[in-house]
Each structure stands twice: as C-alpha cells, then as structure tokens.
Amino acid sequence: MAAPGLSEEPMRSTLLLVAAAIALGAYAYFVESDRPTRADAETAKDNLFDVDSLDLVELEVRAGRDRTVLRKTDSAWNLVEPIQTGADQVEVSGITTGVASLEIERVVTEAAEDLEPFGLADPRVEIAFRTEGDATLTRLRLGNDTPTGGDMYASRADDPRVYLVASYLIDGFNRSTFDLRDKSILHFVRDDVDRLGLSTPTTTASLSRTDDDWRFEAPWEARSDAGAVDALLTRLDTARMQTLVESENATLESYGLAEPRATIEIGAGSTTASLLIGGEADDGGVYARDLSRPLVFTVDASLADDLLRPPEAYRRTELLTLGPLTSRRLEIARNDARLVLAKSADDPAVWQRLEPAPGDVDQPTVTDLLTALIGLRADRFVEETDQAGFGLSGTVVTTSDGEREERVAFSRDGDTVYAVTEEDTGAAVVDAASFEAALAHVAALTGTGADATVP
C-alpha cells in the first residue's frame, strides 16, 4: 500500500524517470567516454605516411655521400648496395619505425614552386621505401631546420606540399652505410660455444665446456673461472666495430695483423670463428680482423686488453664452494687427528660432531669455519708441486653436500701455504694468515684445545 498522501501513479512515474537517468548515464560512460576529448581532437596529428613498419621490405637511405639499399628476407634486413652483407637490425628498425610513425606538425605550403629555400632540392637525408605490394618506392626528403630549430622541412616526392616534422628525428634517419651494416666483430651462436682458444706470442691456452663447466686443457689441466670465461664470450658476442679500415686486399703488416698480438678461436661443434688483434690505431682503438672476412676494423682498446690477459686470469681461484647452507658434511684431517661434522638427520639446520667424540657443537662457530674456508682464494699458482717442497701430509679439508664432494690438501713450505685439489694440476698459493684464521675455529669444535695451525 502507498504511504498516506501519495498515490501509486506519481511514484511509478518517479521510478521510471530515475531508471531512464541511470540508463542515460551508463550510455554516456560506456560510449561517449571512448570518444576523444575536444582538446585531444584539436591536438591530434596526422601521419605523413599510411604504412606499417613491419610491412616494409626495401629501403634506400641517402645520407651525406652514402647511398645504402637494404632488403628484408625472412624478417631479417640485409644490405645489397653498395656491399652485400648483413644489416644492423636495430639501426634499420629505427628508420622503419620512424617512417611509419612520422607525424606532420604543420603544412607549410600546399604547392612549393621552389624547394631550395627549404633545403629539399638537395635534401640532407632521403629515405625511400616500399612494401611487398608496391611497384615503386615512396620517397621522403628531409631538409633544413626551421629558424627556431624545433622543426625541419620535409616533403614527399609524390606530393607538392611542404611539411614541418620534428627536427630531432633527423638523427634516426641520418645513417651512413657503416651505421647500417652489421658491425659484429665475430659471428657465433653464444649458447653453442664449447671451445675457446687464446694465444699470444708467449702463451697458449685452450678451454673446453661440458654442460656449464669450463676447464683448461692447456697450458694445464685445471678448472676455469666460468664467470670470467662467460663474461669474455659475452663481450666478444656483443662487441662492435668502431671503424671499418679496409674492406678487401688489406696489407696486414700495416695493422700489426701479420703477426698478431693475440688470436682468439671460438669453437661450436664443427665450426670455428677466429679473431686477430693487431696494433693500436691513431683514434685510440685497436686493429682487428675476423679471419672469415677480408675486413680490417678497429675495436675498443679495453676489449684488446681483456684478450691479452694471461691464462691465469681465467683460472678458478676458489678452492671450496660448499658453504654453510649447502654443505652437509665437513671433515678436517691433520696428521692423525680428525674433526668430522655432519648435519643432524632430525634437523638439517643443526650441525653435530661425529669425531673425535660425538656431541653438540657451537653452531655459529661451524658457520664461521665454513665461511672462512670458502673464502680462501688462490693468490697465484705453481705448476710443479714437488719443486715447491709441497707434500700431502698437511691438512686435508673435505666437504660434501650428499651428492658432490670437494677435497683440498694444504701444506706449508716455510712461510708459504700451498693447496692442491684433485681436479687441478699444480698447486695454488693461498694466504697463510687467512688459512690459519679459518682453522682457528677447529680447536673450539674438537673440544681439545689442540693447535690448529698448519704443520
């Protein structure tokens, strides 16, 4: 029943009006909200070309004295004139994207009788392009900057109008043949590399990879610093020519490449890529050559410095890698005494002593010991351990994570501490104070107070 003083008919009319208002508001929100605002409509700019950058299949770039023609095959751009070689895909993408997104700032004139005042009779840069279905090239001409410098004059060869476009875009279009060519110094597939050779007039080193593990095969059989080797390969993969000096018939003696300072060989299966490092160039770079191409180019001097490092720079200096979190068992044997620690079967976070007498141990002390052991590094290496007076009667440290075991034997010759592993020939020289500091924790863990220094 309606409330006193109100009839049902007026109430029904009121409800219908409310419903209509809600429906109208919903329409305005879902439909009208998609329309651009008046301000957006007034500031919207037209593109100079109606083309998608991905549809372009041919480019012609005239910049300065260079004329470069590129064509796309199977999604990859290649230079076809003045040379036939791969293209720098990033540089080319900058041009194709720039053409497709080029916006008109303003139309200067509908029909220019003379293009000279705009710098368009002999343009600074001319870009021609076509898509798969085009019979002819569409040409863009870029001329002078406006007096204020914010815009530059542009025109199309098939359009009498002169336009203004943003002047900063010239940098992306003004590319030489060298800019547009592939400037990789070597071609190899990074993930497929399984061999590496480094040689200079005085040293020769070779390494091989199994899974993710790099090892030296010469001048010694030893583990390598995988991080350092990977960093070097990444550097070679990403390095680019600084300048192109000679494209063919180069006199190698003139560039120090007849007897190179360094030769790098990168193997992947049955293929090998080789790089020669020669003398220093006047511009501060270093001459180099990829043996698969008749080119002489320059590379950054810091790359040459990396390639001229001695083989020891790529040798692994860590002696132990299983630390407090990954180790499950630690054994330290010295003469006839042994300390054996293992993580509890009931609580894997708790260490227990198994020898010399089973019992509990101070957990922070175990952590400090393991942290100190994995912190030991080789300061240098010696090739013949017997010449250094090295013996295996000193201290032997063994760690295990349940699947993998690491063992290092330490001994002293005078004031020098040596370390030998089963995986490396020769011996590492380690800091005696650091090693003795690591073993200072042993006495507390054995509960004997025995001297923990190296014999």
Image: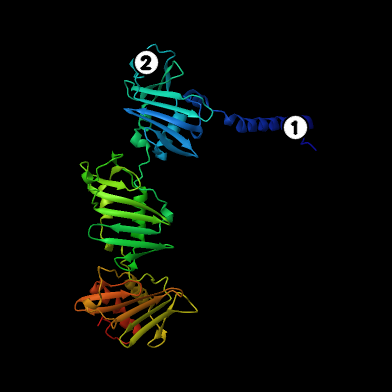
Question: Residue 413: x percent and y percent?
Answer: 21, 79
Relative depth, front residue between 273 and 234: 273
Evaluate whether residue 196 shows in this view.
yes
Residue for badge 2 = 115
N-terminal of the two: label 1 or label 2? 1
- Residue type, numbered disc 2: Leu
Residue lying furthest front in this view?
Answer: 249
Residue for badge 1 = 11
The C terminus: image quadrant:
bottom left
Relative depth, front residue between 135 and 22: 135
- Residue type, numbered disc 1: Met
The N terminus: image quadrant:
top right
Which residue is found at the position 33% from the left and 61% from the top? 206
Residue lying furthest top in this view?
Answer: 113
Q: Secondary structure at mark 1?
A: helix
Above or below: residue 138 compared with residue 88: above
Q: Neighbour class for label 1 at 10 Å: few (<14), some, many (≥20)?
A: few
Give the left or right position of residue 347, taking residue 417 as reference.
right
Q: Secondary structure at mark 2?
A: loop
Relative depth, front residue between 317 and 220: 220
Above or below: residue 375 compared with residue 285: below
Closer to the eye: label 1 or 2: 2
Give the left or right position of residue 402, taking residue 235 as reference.
right
Question: Residue 123: x percent and y percent?
Answer: 35, 22
Q: Image quarter for residue 164?
A: top left
Question: Residue 190: x percent and y percent?
Answer: 41, 53
**Mark 1 and mark 2: span between their CA atoms?**
75 Å
State the count of labels: 2
Q: Image quarter for residue 421?
A: bottom left
Which residue is found at the position 27% from the left and 69% from the top? 378
